Image: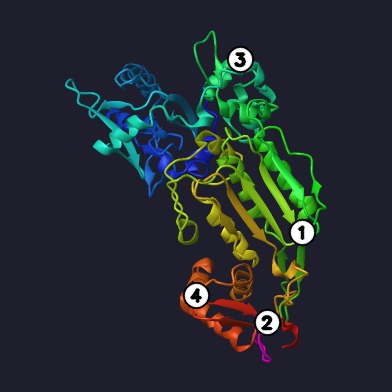
Amino acid sequence: MPLPINILELLKGRIIEHDRIEFKEGWNPDAIYRTICAFANDIENIGGGYIIIGVEEENGMAKLPLKGIQPEQIDAIQRQMIGLNNLIKPVYTPKLSIEEIDSKHIIVLWIPGGANRPYEVPELITVKEKRYFYYIRKYSNSVKANQKEQQELISIANQVPFDDRVNTTATLDDISMTLIRDHLRITKSRLHEFSESLSKADLLGQMDLVSGPPEMLFPRNVALMLFSESPEKYFPYSRIEVVEFPNGADDPEFNERPPFTGPVQQQIIKVIDFFKTNILQEKIIKQPDKAEAVRIWNYPLEALEEAIANSIYHRDYQTREPVEVRIYPDSICILNYVGPDRSIKPETFKVGPIKPRRYRNRRLGDFLKELDLTEGKATGIPRIKKALKENGSPVPILDFDEERTYFEVDFIIHPAFNGKNNINISDKSIRLNKSTETLKESASLILSIIKINPNITASEIALELNISSRAAQKQIANLKSLGIIERVGSKKTGYWTIKEIDLSSY
């Protein structure tokens, strides 16, 4: 039976991260079962992984053309796996699909994180005398767990992520077959071809979205988040609320939009459409002596898309609070409950890279990746910063409390759209001096950063912009020489002031 994922996209490593895919040139049960055990243990809570048999690996990617497996081998492999699955303690059965690509047959094993972990398996599963070990994934390898890692596996045995837990308050009748088939169609899963002929229980079972005995199956939480018409029935306040403050936060006037509800993937799409229709603005600026014009946005769409998708991906569905979007004249605030995992330190958001040890909703993340609504692990904030930098926008303000009860992202409007800005930055060809030198993008960003945090140091500015200290000092020196900025006090404890000046006169 086909798996609920596009196999061609899986081979490209675009939907699933490379360290969650292992390619095997041929049938090697010893190595394969060590990897099955490691994926099933899923010590990082990232959703298990895939083993693709009949594909050579080259630099971490599938080597083309595919080698494939001889058709007469496939039945023998499946028969052997029935017995070998029983050697995993406790018993674990990966989901198997036979795929034909370019007239070559391959076997795809899907190994979701197991509900009965920790699992152990013989080091050599085909020998008579078997020695059992726990295996885990480290980067792209399956390795024996050391004593500390074994203890960690045991400690997380009862910590199945919330989205992967069975919901005994719901029934299969609460799941919409229309939404499931739409998802399979959009993601171009081959399972869509069989969806009309399968019962709801069989289809959900193939997607690993149900659990329980055949006479009393219950849906998993992730199935209700994505494929029920009203997730709020099971997860109160699982919606997005948008409030506009046209005159700023201090003014009593505000406009509260009807909440964005429904399946969570539709919430993301609806809010993004709202931004496109009501919030986003573009300026086209002609450049001197250049045919190509500069296009800038008040807020780059990619940054907003990533922030909204990640607020849905990482929110705590047990906390009865909505995702809040507050729109001010010069900023957009996206507030999510709860905060980041405790394995992420506050300073990491400044210097990076961000490497969480736990993913709150691993299954939900996989579905959103298939829909191109979010990217691979730990890429959300880097993608946001990259989109803002390319648009010439100020860096985002990221905030959360020590108790990790919330996570807030503030987007500052591009200076060219801020009518209250003391500096006239209505054109990217603003002159730095009376010669033809123009204000560089990094200098514009430095002004925006100083406006947000006047106490910031030059070295911290360099970190925020991901440029060298020398480059930052050069731009700061230019701005100081023009009398645009001034440092009051020492380099470490002082603060910046910005002079009210219209640069268009230079």
Q: Does 161 sit above or below residue 195?
A: below
Residue at mark 2 to residue at mark 4: CA–CA distance: 20 Å
In-image side of 37 versus 314 (left or right):
left
Task: Identify the amino acid type marked 3.
Answer: Ser
Provide the residue designation for mark 4: 493
Is 431 magenta? The answer is yes
Residue at mark 3 to residue at mark 2: CA–CA distance: 70 Å
The extreme bottom residue here reads: 434
Q: In the rendered structure, are the residues bearing label 4 and label 3 in contact, judged by CB atoms less than 8 Å apart?
A: no
Which numbered circle lies on residue 364? none
Q: Provide the secondary structure element on which disc 1 rests.
A: loop
* Disc with the residue nearer the chain's start (4 vs 3): 3
Q: Does 434 sit above or below residue 395?
A: below
Residue under the point 38% across and 36% down: 43
Residue under the point 62% across and 78% down: 497
Residue at mark 4 to residue at mark 3: CA–CA distance: 68 Å
Q: Which residues are magenta?
A: 430-440
Indicate which label's residue lies in the foreground, 3 or 2. 2
Q: Provide the secondary structure element on which disc 2 rests.
A: loop
